[in-house]
Image (cartoon, rainbow, N blue to C red):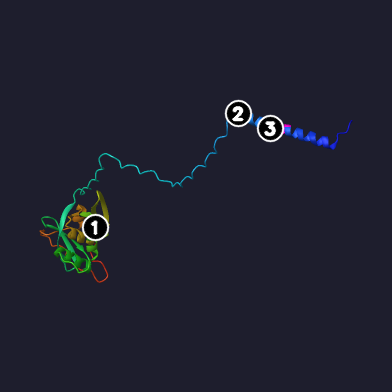
């Protein structure tokens, strides 16, 4: 095999390299003709503002007629409307029916007797007492004491209920009878007494029979035979 001189070998290598470059250039031109010139470089998208989750809007209020107020609880059958006729020295607050032929004495403490006498006469202390505070609470809450009920006499203790109207609702609150009577006086609310209470604790003012007079209680003890708040 004949040997190629170094100079000729270099010349042959240069020619081959030139032909390879030319072929690549032709191939590139052909691709540009087929695909068209390269377009402009697309711009980067603008930054998106930070998003904050917004709660969905509240549902609109229901349309149509408003719900009716709760019906007033009726006075229980047979209850007798009574009013305060005085406070005895025992002390006891005495309530009577319209004819004042039947009275019901309710034994109370001295401070309760003082409060009831003050409210009967329309007088007040310079600073509000507990019942005055309750009256203010009713006014500020736009509530009204509609009536007072003396529902039962259990173990010589009267059980009373306050009937209050508040924003279309009716509340029944358990209460001491002395507090219920004091609040009824301050709010000009009627007092209703259960027939069983009148039958058991009532005293007839026109009876020919002598009535047993309740005795004042000894110190620290409830009255013997009397009915307490």
SS at badge 1: helix
Q: Which mark is residue 33?
A: 2
Q: In the visual, does 6 lie left or right of 80?
A: right
Quadrant of the rendering where the N terminus is positioned: top right
Magenta segment range?
A: 19-23
* Quarter occupied by residue 130: bottom left
Q: Would you call the spot at circle 3 few (<14 residues within 10 Å), some (14-19), or many (20 or more)?
A: few
Q: CA distance from mark 3 to mark 1?
A: 97 Å
Along the polypeptide, which appears first: circle 2 or circle 3?
3
Q: CA distance from mark 1 to mark 2?
A: 91 Å
10 Å crowding of disc 1: few (<14), some (14-19), many (20+): few
Considering only order in the chain, which callout, 1 or 3, is on the residue closer to the N terminus? 3
- Using the image, tell me which numbered label, if any, was put on residue 24: 3
Residue at left 24%, top 57%?
A: 140
Q: Residue reaching furthest bottom?
A: 219
- Image disc number at residue 140: 1
């Amino acid at each position: 095999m004949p040997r190629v001189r170094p100079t000729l070998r270099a010349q042959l290598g240069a020619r081959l390299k030139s032909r390879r470059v030319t072929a690549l250039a032709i191939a590139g031109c052909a691709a540009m003709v087929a695909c068209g010139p390269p377009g402009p470089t697309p711009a980067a998208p603008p930054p998106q503002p930070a998003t904050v989750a917004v709660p969905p809007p509240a549902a609109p209020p229901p349309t149509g007629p408003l719900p009716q107020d709760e019906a007033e609880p009726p006075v229980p059958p047979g209850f007798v409307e009574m009013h305060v006729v005085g406070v005895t020295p025992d002390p006891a607050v005495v309530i009577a029916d319209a004819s004042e032929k039947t009275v019901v004495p309710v034994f109370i403490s001295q401070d309760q007797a003082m409060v009831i006498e003050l409210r009967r006469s329309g007088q007040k202390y310079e600073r509000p007492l507990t019942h005055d505070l309750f009256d203010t609470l009713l006014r500020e809450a736009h509530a009204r004491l509609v009536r007072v009920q003396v529902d039962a006499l259990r173990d010589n203790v009267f059980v009373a209920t306050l009937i209050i109207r508040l924003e279309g609702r009716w509340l029944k609150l358990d209460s001491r009878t002395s507090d219920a009577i004091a609040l009824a006086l301050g709010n000009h609310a009627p007092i209703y007494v259960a027939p069983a209470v009148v039958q058991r604790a009532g005293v007839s003012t026109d009876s020919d029979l002598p009535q047993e007079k309740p005795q004042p209680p000894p110190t620290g003890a409830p009255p013997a035979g009397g009915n307490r708040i």
